[in-house]
Image (cartoon, rainbow, N blue to C red):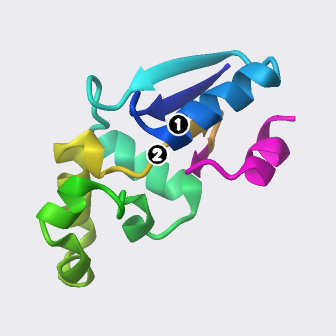
Amino acid sequence: MVEIVCYPRCGTCKKAVKWLEDHGIDYKYRDITEKNPKKTELKKWFKASGLPLKKFFNTSGKLYRDLGLKDKIADMSDTEITELLASDGLLVKRPVLLSGANVLLGFKEAEWEAELL
């Protein structure tokens, strides 16, 4: 069983959940606003995804814009980025798919097919 970390009002998350259901894949749903990722969990996700830490930001989100992060991230340390992402789930890009030791960020159908089918 995979876990999908989502924001219920996110259109991309809704598409991802529908995709899982359409393909008969059992999943555990986690609302990122109710259960925000902790720093230790984020560090595991960073390592498993192989992506730069900056890719974990929801750059189209209101909170990201309100905090002016576009201009601040380049000067932030990995620790500062992790602490900031752990402070509010709405800063985290989603959906996050946790599949065994692998982590996929965002919904890219081809990636999900390669991972799950």
Nearer to us: label 2 or label 1: 1
> Is 101 rendered above or below residue 93?
above
User: Residue 94: image x %, image y %?
Assistant: 46, 45
Q: Tell me what residue is drawn at x 39 percent, y 66 percent.
A: 53
Residue 94, numbered circle: 2
Residue type at mark 1 is: Cys
Residue type at mark 2 is: Arg
For label 2, the SS is loop
Q: Which quadrant holds residue 7?
A: top left
* Magenta highlight on residue 110: yes
Q: Which quadrant holds residue 71?
A: bottom left
Image quadrant holding the C terminus, namely top right
Q: CA distance from mark 2 to mark 1?
A: 7 Å
Seen as rendered, the residue at the extreme right is 117
Position of 37 with respect to 2 (left or right) is left
Q: Tell me what residue is drawn at x 34 percent, y 32 percent.
A: 32
CB under 8 Å between callouts 2 and 1? yes
Magenta-tinted stretch: 103-117
Residue 96 makes an appearance in the image: no
Q: Label 1, on which residue? A: 13
Nearest the camera: 53 or 106?
A: 106
For label 1, the SS is helix
User: Residue 100: image x %, image y %?
Assistant: 65, 33
Position of 83 with respect to 114 (left or right) is left
